[in-house]
Amino acid sequence: MATRPYISIQYEGEELGEDHKLGCKCCRFRAGHDLPIPATLTIEETREAAQRFSFAIFRDWTQLNAIIKRFEGTLQKRWMKKNVKQRRDVLLKAWPDISTTHRPDFANFRESKKQISRARTMRSEAFLWPYINLEDLVQRHLLLLFLNSRGRTLPDIHRAADFDRAHVGFGFDDDVLSLGIGDQDFCCASHFLEDNPIEELCMVVQSRCSPAKYATVVDPDKLRLVKKLKFKHIRPATEGLVTLEIQHGIYRFLLACAKLILHDVEPAMLFLAPHQPEPDMPVPRTTEWENVTTHALEASYKNPQKLNLERLKMLVGGRRSAAEDHVYSLKEDPGYFINHVREWREHSDRFDRGKDACFCFSCAKDVAPRAVQDAFTALLVWDDIYRKLEFMDPMDVQMGRANEDKVRLADEDAHKWTAMSCIVKTLVIIETSILKDGIPNSPRLRNISNIFLDKEGVKDWAIASIKASDGQQRVHNLFQSIFDEYMCGLHRLQKLVEEVQYMLDNDDDATQYMDSWIVEHFSDLALLCELIKAILSLQPWYDTVGAMEWNERLTRQGQRMNKVDTTLGKLVTGIPTISPQTTRRFCDPSDSDFEYPADKARTKANVEKMRRAEKHLDDFWGHIEGEIKEEVGLDLQKIMRIRAFEPRTIYRTPPWQEPETPTRKTPTKILGEVDPNVNVYRAYDSPTRSKFTPTPAKEKVKTRGVIAGAHHPRTVADDAAPVEPEEVATPKVKIKQKAFNVFCSLLPTTMSANQPCREIAWDDFLSAMDAIGLKPEKLYGSVWHFQPCAEEFRKVHVTRSISFHEPKEVRRGNKIPRPMVRTFGRRLKHAYGWTDAESMFEVE
């Protein structure tokens, strides 16, 4: 059963034909020429279109709601039994022109091949409904989620989310910023007119079931005549109209799918059958670990979720813990430090292009201080974000004291979210700047990158399209859109980040050009996008634009919203003051003084090398800390001491001690061992002792009277030593043999630490962490987050989460390298106070 022909009121790109002169598909998409733009309509045409869409939305929703209340269980059973081909046929019949790939609005970024014709551009349907596609809906249970969320809730609940998920061009919301801050609903006419001095058509959206009152087009001159609190939101008419068009397409498609699945049910019975209780949503079986990509994909088909403040604390807490461990590892482990400096050196803009990496003084003098600056910046900012989240009250409390008349949070809560917005915006700028400098200089992209200065004298880069492969072209297109303010505002940072993650998960050709340094910094940018999305979800209760203007006004008056800004300013100012002699003397990665054979067996020579490298590292940090404190008055040790969760002590290798060789006495041989003719008495030749065990005597129990001395306890002498209670040994946790072997490598004993640790398979590491109650979840980039599960399912006592980066070697099929195993074990010890595996675990 095919749906009615779709007629869009939006701009269709393919109408331009061959002579559009807009360049190739990739260039057109980056410039936004293919994105839907508002149609030029008169007031009467706008009102007529709004009424037509409103009546169509509620007509289809009423039928879908009736079907879901009666046949949702049947829909679930039939859909789960269908194979991929059968599901595909149903979707194609419901929407013949349905998109084929995931996020079809980004298809031009993926198909940047030169042989593609320029004649056709993307249809506007791909941008208005990017989540309605075959690749996603034929898998798992996404269509069932879609039917449940839209069939059991009113359309106005999804209004804001539907427009936000669409990929539209300019003309709908001209004040969009690069961080996505600027979108908001207006609760009343006065707020709308304050931010919209230009007279234009408006659309009042009300939370009513009546199609006549759902969306009303109002002239701005008559807005003040509308009584307060009789409407829910006010939006520009262009945006409101495209939102109605999006909802009309969704309900038309879902109703067609439901009728096709229930093809054998009489049409009258769809509305006359008795109601059924809502069934549980079927969860498909999968062997994969949880990942944020799946959650983000399912969110497009679910009801809009409330802000989960606890999850934000969990994610930020894991990143903050990683930043603290990173700083301490730089101070504690010379091997970790020098490898980190090498990574920064390889992505430095001072790289002599066309030659191998050089670590001479002229090249390396700026790299180590910059790596130090990045480490402390991450610690300061993520710790500040974590503390701000910790001091926030639960969302129920915040909404309870909000002003319902003005639809605004209380001032104290709004100020906290404003401070959060400011520090997040600062960190987005920092991470974007780091990636912009590092990607074109990375070892796998520098051969096709051309760095130049733009018209304003700002450093920019482009790739030589002749030399670039398809994978390199895709990496360049995506990150160039993130770095460019215009394109980032057009395509939205969150959507670009999700597309990069989709590339990492599905395009091996492009992923090979993103090394671990790039992926780690991209992971931070993705986490910041999650925070931005959380802040935007507070609208209209939180006015982001007004809050940012208020913060800028305070800044001009000399009042800082974030005290961490002052520390960051001192850090940025103090790093360049480090004398070149310090980096020249202590930061030459080719210096043998940094040789740190921690992975080799403990011999006298290796221990002396390790102690020399640790002393060399201590001298470097001593000079760095001293110079920064002298120049700008910033105490790095104090920062680490204040920001750390718990006090830490830098581990240093003890001096070499010769192992004690036990003296062996020459055993005296008895005559029987020398002369076999001598009979020697052996204990096992005699009867066993158990045969002669005497029977224990019976004890007579007194049944009458009082036992003598029962009321006269024995008095302990004053000089007698008190009896100390015996220490109760902590019971060991029973785990399987494979998990036990993993933790023995991560947490070796004192004796086994002298031997080289073995490599660990990444899947074994995930299974071992899950076995003790730390549930793995794949986040953006290379980050894996381990969250403590419910207490009844935990085998160890842990209260906070921890995150690790998946090593680049694992993506190539190898195991976790030994230095990384040592780093993982050190972080587990610091985070949870664990000592060694043999004292904590045993094989079940």
Image: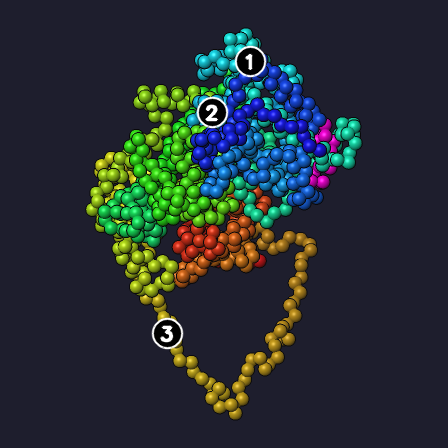
Q: Secondary structure at mark 3?
A: loop
Please tell me how crowded label 1 is: few (under 14), some (14-19), or many (20+) other residues with Cα within 10 Å.
Answer: some
Q: Give the spatial CA distance, label 2 vs label 1.
A: 20 Å
Q: Give the spatial CA distance, label 1 vs label 3.
A: 103 Å
In terms of depth relative to the viewer, which is nearer, 352 or 721?
Answer: 352
Which residue is label 3 attached to?
Answer: 663
Q: Which residues are magenta?
A: 66-80
Comparing labels 1 and 3, the label whose residue is closer to the camera: 1
Please tell me how crowded label 3 is: few (under 14), some (14-19), or many (20+) other residues with Cα within 10 Å.
Answer: few
Where's residue 243, x and y in %?
A: 57, 24
Residue located at (43% from left, 46% from top): 469
Q: Secondary structure at mark 2?
A: loop
Disc with the residue nearer the chain's start (1 vs 3): 1
Comparing labels 2 and 3, the label whose residue is closer to the camera: 2
Q: Amino acid at mark 1?
A: Ile
Q: Which mark is residue 170?
A: 2
